[in-house]
Image (tube, coloured by chain):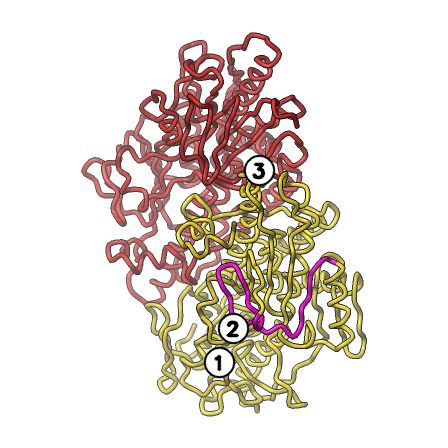
Chain colours: A red, B yellow
């Protein structure tokens, strides 16, 4: 390739970055995509890995495999450590790369609202590793309760507390309720998994606050039908080794999961431009930084308002559309055409709750229950990258649906004893978590 | 259940222990199976996880799920820490259990012939965690080589060294050769995975020494056709951060894998009875300990000769047949019938080498290549526990076979940077491994 071919460096292989890379296929640019992981993660299905329905490999695809046929793209496993916007360079692991255009699509992680000490006590769900950690903790809680019962001592009740009533919290709580009542129900001799309590805490007035009130109410009803105790206006003020504090109330919690806060990637700050309170980078309507026309920020890391002045949400469709738009604006630059402002086309939203339970809104149309769930299933499987994954996921789901079984109930860890149990043994305070 | 129902405690949920538990279904005993993992691992397919062909969840099944319908069996996740044979008791995690019969089926792990310092440099393959570690190292070696090439510096050649020419070493080397020439071939821009060297080292005169000479020769030819360099009579005298020493020769090694030695579980010594050099427990023909008629040892942990004075090998069929035999002898005791000596029925052996490559012997019949591979495929899928796993595995294989693709090319680790890379960064000596 000629040395004057413009070089586009993309940081992040999530929905935004990967879409941008693909939109540049066959165009007169050279694309370098950097990610600190080797795989794209289909985040909307992470909760299925966390609840033992799917394997990590089912919802991931190697980024270089996705781009293997795109001759103008290369993929490098590297972690960005610094930007030099003035010189159009960046450092990533032991690399120093020059760029003509930069697309930063580094995504978001969970935030603990200034309480980082809560993280080991209440893991969030953003990566495959997070999902495996949650799966380990949930399965191990049942194993340790069964063992405790075998010693003949009093068994502590199993309480799973999910903090945050957004889509992730609702999925986790709904699916946990489902598996305790189906897949796990017959496998234990001394404890009754059906008696496990699943408690969903939401700080606001209703679950799924991004949806309309009728759909929030429907979601809560569907959750309760699955056996979830929903508590709204429940502000978490503390998380302990086996408790969650709501105001002055101490709620016993065997396992606590965090689905409440989101913070943009620290790469936003590393850019050296102003960021908002959640660490997002405000961008111009063309998705670039004003001062640096050649730098685009997209996806969960970007902050942009729609035509009604509402901040665009951190959702896969937004990231995908922004990835396409950033790539198109680069190509317009190269052709000497003016850039176009980004316009988000909202195709509607769907949130799943559990087996045959979901809510959805498409324009003014609201639907819930089985119909919404089928729509959700269809959309998510169609979006899954790679035929193989799509097929395995479809099969695994059909299987779980008809048999109520969960195939991937695997506790893994190094050393040989599961890590959470080792943790329980190390930390006297945590010991009470599982007993 | 009446309190005088005899209690059979089984230690280990591998092929031996699980078969023994199932053979006691519906019988007038109470079965407690202990394992320090929550899952049974289908060890013959571990190499497929290590080489990104299958997900860990595809070759494992929760032990309590396997036994969920067996009302007289309970499963406890616990690690055995001591036996008191005189009082017929054992300690496991925080439990103290009494037994009337004890079946110890704790299996084996890898042994480094007194060189435990080799373990972090050359991981073995006995658990799902081992397989994920090998997968991480292999995939990461390619990623780091591609990144090194992107810096413009000289690229070190990629050398994968597999130590040990038994079935596991042959599988690993053959499959590594296969994936570098197929699944990975088109995914990189700067390096050519096809140029990676795969070197299989065997200390003895021929690979697969448990097979006949003609099959060993055939296996070596099939390996070489796949691109593996086979070196026999190669005694490893040292393993360094990026080298393997054979006699006085230093062989560069990007990734080194260990498939050479096996040591029985330390639970053998914990029994307080004499063990052989490999830590195996010599048992009577009825599979019990002579001094303790009520204690059976089976599977890889047991040492027993066949009618020709040859030690029974550490294979799944031996463990399965011993598990059945131990259970039957317990039931004969309870009926007041004399015990029967164990007789191993050798149905033949099969060793896979790679895509459409294998060797097999059934009695005097020897076969190799595609036929042996098909037989191997059939036998192993039929043995896989649980229909779901069987189906997913079959599909994954059919998919890989026709597309030469590997679906599960996932590097995972905590913290976010893959663990091996973090290791590389921490240890200056190891740094050279990957560069």
Q: Which residue is mark 1?
A: B279
CA–CA distance in space, label 3 to label 2:
37 Å
Q: Does the magenta run of residues contain A351?
A: no
In this view, the mark in front (1 or 3): 3
Q: Which mark is residue A63?
A: 3
Q: Quadrant of residue B214?
A: bottom right
Query: Residue B261, image x and y in percent?
Result: 55, 73
Chain identity of mark 1? B
Q: Does the magenta run of residues contain B228?
A: yes
Q: Which residue is mark 2?
A: B108
Whether B209 is drawn above or below A250: the answer is: below
Q: Is residue B74 left or right of residue B382?
A: left
First reached walking from the N terminus: tag 2 or tag 1: 2
**Residue placed at 53% from the left, 39% from the top?**
B151
Q: Quadrant of residue B274?
A: bottom left
Q: Toward the viewer: A277 or B172?
A: B172
């Amino acid at each position: 390739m000629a040395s004057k071919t413009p070089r586009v460096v993309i940081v992040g292989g999530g929905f935004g970055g990967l879409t941008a890379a693909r939109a540049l296929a066959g165009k007169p640019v050279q694309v370098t995509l950097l990610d600190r992981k080797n795989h794209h993660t289909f985040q909307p299905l992470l909760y299925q890995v966390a609840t033992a329905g799917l394997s990590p490999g089912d919802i991931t695809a190697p980024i270089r495999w996705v781009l293997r046929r795109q001759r103008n793209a290369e993929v490098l496993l590297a972690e960005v450590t610094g930007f030099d916007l003035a010189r159009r360079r960046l450092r990533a692991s032991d690399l120093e790369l020059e760029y003509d255009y930069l697309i930063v699509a580094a995504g978001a992680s969970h935030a603990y609202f200034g309480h980082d000490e809560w993280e080991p006590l209440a893991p969030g769900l953003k990566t495959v590793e997070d999902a495996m950690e949650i799966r380990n903790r949930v399965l191990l809680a049942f194993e340790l309760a069964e063992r405790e019962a075998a010693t003949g001592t009093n068994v502590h009740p199993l309480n799973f507390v999910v903090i945050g009533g957004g889509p992730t919290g609702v999925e986790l709580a709904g699916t946990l309720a489902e598996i305790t009542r189906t897949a796990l129900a017959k496998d234990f001799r001394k404890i009754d998994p059906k008696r496990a309590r699943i408690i969903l805490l939401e700080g606001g007035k209703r679950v799924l606050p991004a949806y309309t009130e009728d759909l929030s109410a429907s979601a809560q009803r569907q959750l309760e039908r699955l056996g979830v105790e929903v508590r709204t206006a429940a502000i978490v003020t503390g998380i302990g080794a086996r408790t969650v504090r709501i105001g002055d109330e101490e709620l016993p919690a065997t396992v606590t999961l965090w689905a409440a806060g989101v913070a943009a990637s620290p790469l936003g700050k590393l850019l050296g431009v102003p960021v908002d309170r959640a660490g997002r980078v405000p961008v111009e309507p063309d998705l670039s930084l004003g001062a640096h026309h050649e730098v685009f920020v997209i996806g969960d890391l970007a902050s942009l308002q729609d035509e009604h002045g509402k901040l665009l949400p951190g959702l896969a469709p937004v990231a995908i559309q922004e990835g396409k738009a950033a790539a198109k604006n680069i190509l317009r630059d190269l052709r000497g055409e003016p850039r176009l402002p980004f316009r988000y086309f909202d195709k509607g939203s769907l949130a799943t709750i559990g087996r045959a339970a979901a809510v959805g809104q498409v324009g003014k149309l609201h639907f819930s229950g089985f119909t919404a769930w089928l729509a959700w299933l269809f959309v998510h499987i169609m979006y899954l990258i790679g035929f193989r994954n799509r097929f395995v996921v479809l099969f695994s789901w059909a299987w779980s649906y008809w048999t109520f079984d969960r195939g991937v109930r695997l506790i893994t860890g190094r050393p040989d004893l599961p890590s959470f149990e080792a943790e329980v043994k190390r930390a006297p305070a945590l010991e009470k978590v599982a007993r």
